[in-house]
Image: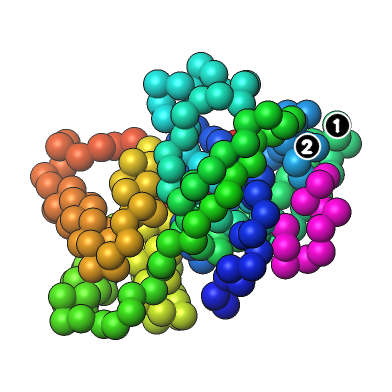
């Protein structure tokens, strides 16, 4: 994934608050847009050149979900900055869009006065300045857990091999692993990984979750969750 051009963040970016939804760098989020204010946002994004159709996906704070239909619910201050890369319009006027995660970002200033919210964003680093030994050790543990989960039949071997070998960087591997290997109902874990600037800590958080999956797979029959579906389903919006 090419680095994001910082000049694209000089102007306010549309803010799309959603409950239980996290966009990590390098991942793709499908969304169904039907509210008039966000249809307006989508139309205005389409008026921009390709490559500049940026939108920030912000997770609503649960206590404020009742205010979702206003511009005033609180959101987590670290957001997933994405680029709208595909769109289709349905017969009923809704739009299906794909948002590709480009970067982590922090809300520096917010404007709630328009039809939809906008924010001035400060990009946060995804790649480390150097690969310290602690980073390498944490990343190696994640790779080992991927292999063990595949051997145990907990997840698809092709999926984990693709994540482990074809990601463009170790940071991308961690983000893709978190997106695919953390269940959709564990959004707090994904948000924690999104907010964490230190790669080794992101790797440790993911490793802790993967160890939990592995331990669950080894539990005696009758003690697991018979309703778990793997891989996790896509987020529905």
Cα separation, mark 1 vs mark 2, equals: 12 Å
Q: Where are the magenta residues, as a range?
A: 43-53
Q: Which mark is residue 39?
A: 2
> What is the number of callouts on the image?
2
Crowd tier of the residue under label 1, counting other residues whose Cα lies within 10 Å: few below 14, some 14–19, many 20 or above: few
Residue occupying the far top of the picture: 66
User: At 16% from the left edge and 42% from the top edge, which residue is drawn?
Assistant: 221
Q: Give above or below for 132 relative to 97.
A: below
Q: Is residue 47 magenta?
A: yes
The answer, for residue 144, to whether it is visible in the render is no
**Of 10 and 81, which appears nearest the observer?**
10
Say left or right for 191 vs 106: left
Residue 184: which quarter of the image?
top left
User: At 22% from the left edge and 75% from the top edge, which residue is drawn?
Assistant: 135
Q: Point out the tag, 1 or 2, that comes first from the N-terminus.
A: 2
Q: Position of residue 89 (x, y in %)?
A: 84, 44
Q: Secondary structure at mark 2?
A: helix
Q: Give above or below for 142 relative to 182.
A: below
**Of 151 and 89, which appears nearest the observer?**
89
User: At 29% from the left edge and 68% from the top edge, which residue is drawn?
Assistant: 199
Say left or right for 8 vs 162: right
Q: Position of residue 177 (x, y in %)?
A: 37, 63
Instruction: Report which residue position mark 1 lands on.
Output: 92
User: At 32% from the left edge and 49% from the top edge, which residue is drawn?
Assistant: 192
Dominant SS of magenta comes to loop
**Of 154 and 87, which appears nearest the observer?**
87
Disc nearest the viewer among 1 and 2: 2
Q: Position of residue 168 (x, y in %)?
A: 46, 80
Q: Quadrant of the N terminus?
A: bottom right
Say left or right for 67 vs 158: right
Q: Which mark is residue 119?
A: none
Residue occupying the far left of the picture: 220
């Amino acid at each position: 994934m090419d680095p994001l051009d910082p000049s694209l963040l000089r102007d306010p970016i549309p803010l799309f608050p959603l409950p239980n939804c996290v966009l990590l760098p390098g991942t793709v989020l499908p969304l169904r847009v039907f509210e008039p204010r966000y249809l307006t946002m989508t139309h205005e994004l389409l008026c921009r050149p390709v490559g500049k159709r940026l939108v920030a996906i912000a997770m609503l704070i649960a206590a404020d979900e009742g205010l979702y239909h206003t511009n005033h619910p609180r959101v987590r201050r670290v957001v997933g900055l994405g680029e709208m890369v595909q769109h289709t319009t349905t017969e009923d006027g809704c739009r299906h869009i794909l948002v590709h995660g480009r970067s982590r970002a922090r809300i520096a200033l917010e404007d709630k006065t328009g039809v939809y919210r906008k924010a001035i964003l400060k990009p946060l680093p995804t790649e480390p300045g150097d690969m310290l030994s602690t980073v390498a050790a944490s990343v190696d543990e994640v790779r080992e857990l991927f292999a063990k989960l595949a051997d145990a039949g907990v997840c698809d071997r092709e999926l984990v091999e693709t994540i482990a070998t074809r990601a463009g960087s170790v940071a991308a591997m961690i983000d893709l692993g978190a997106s695919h290997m953390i269940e959709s109902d564990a959004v707090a874990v994904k948000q924690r990984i999104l907010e964490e600037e230190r790669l080794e800590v992101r790797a440790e958080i993911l490793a802790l979750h993967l160890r939990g999956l592995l331990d669950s797979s080894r539990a005696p029959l009758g003690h697991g969750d018979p309703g778990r579906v793997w891989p996790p389903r896509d987020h529905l919006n």
